[in-house]
Image (cartoon, rainbow, N blue to C red):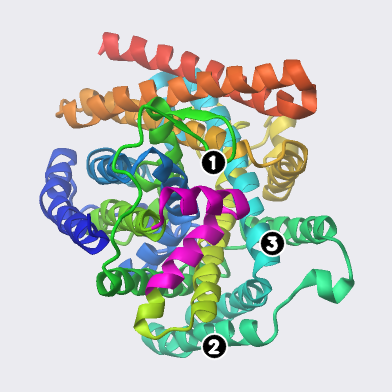
Amino acid sequence: MNGAVLLGLGCILFLLAYRFYGRFIERVLGVDPRQATPAHTLRDDVDYVPTRPAILFGHHFASIAGAGPIVGPVLAAQFGWMAVVLWVVLGSVFIGATHDLIALFLSVRHQGRSIGWVIESLMGYTGRMLFLTFCLLALILVIAQFTFFVIATFISVPAVSTASLLFILLAVAFGYMVYRMNVNFIVATLIFVPLMFGCVYVGVRFPLDLQALLGCSVGSARSIWAVILLTYCFAASVLPVWILLQPRDYLNSYLLYAMMALGLVGIFVAAPAIQLPAFAGWEVADPRGGTSLLFPMLFVTVACGACSGFHALVATGTTAKQVDNERHLRPVAYGGMLVEGLLALIALMAVAWMTPAEYAQGLKEQSEVALFAKGLAGFTLKLGIPLEFGKVFISLALAAFLMTTLDTATRLARFTFQELFLPRGEADVQRIVPGASWARMIFSGRYTATSVVVFASGTLLLGAGTQGLWPIFASANQLLAALTLLGATLWLIKHKRKTTFVFIPMIFMIVTSGAALVKLFFQNALAWQAKGFAAGGILALSTGGLIVLAVVLVFFGGVRLLKR
């Protein structure tokens, strides 16, 4: 099979899905461009800000993408390229993009409130509290896992760390010029996008290698970067969205688009022959040890490349508060997920041209991110781009993906933690009324809430290791999507609208992600029993907690479904 042909077919299917299936969902939901959005009715220029669709798409896509659509398909390629392609295409079209569009629509129609508040309106206060707890645990997993990926990239490619830090300064300057100095948006874009690409050159010339500068070990360098990155996450969580989060995501999106464009053109020019098997069997040997079952591990390993519950948190946490008009819902949410699916196909092509032996050896010797960068740089070599420069540029784009997810995830985790202390029916995490409980007085502040989130993420990062974290993060992420679809099904029933296109994906996601979590729980529990708490204790407890929360939530939702 030729990789260029396969990628071309994927592009065509995604375009057709956006044109026809996306519009079908719009009609069922009742999207109305005349409806005033929360960005206008609740405008505060901190979280609620009417935003141009191009900027909003950049923020949303940069926030949801992260490493998921890259790490997942690269790892899942061990099951065979055909299995990955089918799940990425069908999952993105009928589950992932559908999930994202519905989540964003529901939040916009509920004053930009979080999916947790929407769940309360459908499943009651207890349902909301359980759902928020599940969301918080999933977000802490996201922050810990993606911080690890950023640290690994900074250490292996020091040029990336220099450019990434410069990007932050550029984002602050861009936000200040556009929103406070009223500089024309297009003019500011024409100034700052070239400056951003200039940072890539500066990074190559002046790499920030902590081991060389401080004479420290790799372990010490990792710890220093962990502190720096978690401090950045804290700042991104508490600052107004226009200062850092929104402009950073918008500017970084150009870097991400450039990487995807290079990947697309490189694959079409190189036209690589796929050498990995189309189907490797129902049970395959993991190159890093052990074995993996195609069901359910394929679906949760691909993770964000086909469907992601984290997207609902982004859509309802930040994106919904910035939607200028409901006509932008489909391009931002449904279109954003399809572009992420396209990125997942590019990631698969980056390793599918390798022989099975080369692929297995590559996973043993380097991270999934590094293997992707190496593979894609091989395609861009056909365009006349030097291999080493291509690897640095692609690694830099990946770090941009990761950091935009990190800052958004931290802000969302802060919102979620604050919501846990809201009284029944309350949605405003910033407003503290007289007579509020002592718990809310202490924990509802954004500085306190962010501190708790950052501390928990750092503890998980340093205490649980990271090799076993990805499948647990991915399983929790998929199950979160299933719970969001459960809430969407209840809303559709309540408003007497079609439910099949949401109900069937919900059942599928509950079964696959639930089975994966149960498998991972027993795997880590056995490791804990055999080798001690450090070998699997934290992960076993985390997985067990997620399973209990999910079972109770599904029971609550099932009862509501039967009643309706």
Which quadrant is the C terminus positioned in? Answer: top left
Residue 487 falls in image quadrant: top left
Q: Earlier in the sequence, mark 2 or mark 3?
A: 2
Q: Compare residues 98 and 468 and report the one nearer the observer.
A: 468
| Left or right of 31, for residue 516 | right
Can residue 119 be seen in the rendering of this structure?
yes
Residue drawn at point x = 43 percent, y = 38 percent: 309
Q: Amino acid at mark 2?
A: Gly
Select label 3 or label 1 by which is in front: 1
Q: Are marks 2 and 1 in contact (CB under 8 Å)?
A: no
Q: Amino acid at mark 3?
A: Tyr
Can residue 181 be seen in the rendering of this structure?
no
Residue underneath mark 3: 232
Is disc 2 surrounded by few (<14), some (14 to 19) or many (20+) residues within 10 Å? Answer: few
Q: Amino acid at mark 1?
A: Pro
Which quadrant is the N terminus positioned in? Answer: bottom left
Query: x%, y% of residue 96?
Result: 31, 42
Query: x%, y% of residue 526?
Result: 67, 17
Q: Earlier in the sequence, mark 3 or mark 1?
A: 3
Label 1 residue SS: loop
Span colored in magenta: 354-379
